[in-house]
């Protein structure tokens, strides 16, 4: 998996869908050296959400890529 900054226009394509089926989850482990991600399989379940059209001006969007395919995003801002 690769995590990198993505433009807001790319992030909005993920918000066009309001549900998805989860089969794996990613755990974030923070340390003094940065962070690590690990993956674990889970029983499939449906995840529904409402997109947030009110992005903060100081936020940055990061995309999660697996085999160069965008599979998720997270928005971080200074108050997160």
Image (spheres, rainbow, N blue to C red):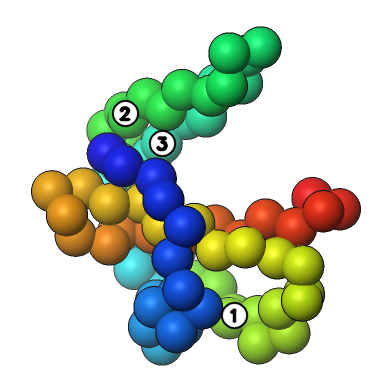
Tag of residue 33: none
Q: Tell whether 20 sits left or right of 54.
A: left
Q: Position of residue 21 (x, y in %)?
A: 30, 61
Q: Position of residue 49 (x, y in %)?
A: 55, 73
Choose between 2 and 38: the one closer to the eye.
2
Q: Residue at x 47, y 57 (%)?
A: 5
Residue at mark 1 to residue at mark 2: CA–CA distance = 25 Å
Q: Position of residue 43 (x, y in %)?
A: 29, 41
* Image quarter of residue 32: top right
Tag of residue 26: 3
Q: Which residue is disc 2 drawn over?
A: 40
Label located before the other in sequence (2 or 3) = 3
Tag of residue 50: 1
Residue at mark 2 to residue at mark 3: CA–CA distance = 7 Å
Residue found farthest to the right = 79
Let me know if residue 37 appears in the view. Answer: yes
Q: Residue at x 65, y 87 (%)?
A: 53
The residue mark sitting in front, 2 or 3, is: 3
Q: Secondary structure at mark 2?
A: strand
């Amino acid at each position: 998996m690769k995590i990198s900054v993505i433009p807001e226009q790319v992030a909005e394509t993920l918000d066009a869908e309001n549900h998805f089926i989860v089969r794996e989850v990613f755990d974030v482990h923070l340390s003094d050296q940065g962070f690590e991600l690990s993956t674990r399989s889970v029983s499939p379940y449906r995840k529904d959400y409402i997109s947030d059209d009110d992005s903060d001006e100081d936020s940055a969007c990061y995309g999660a890529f697996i085999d160069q395919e965008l599979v998720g995003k997270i928005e971080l801002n200074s108050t997160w």
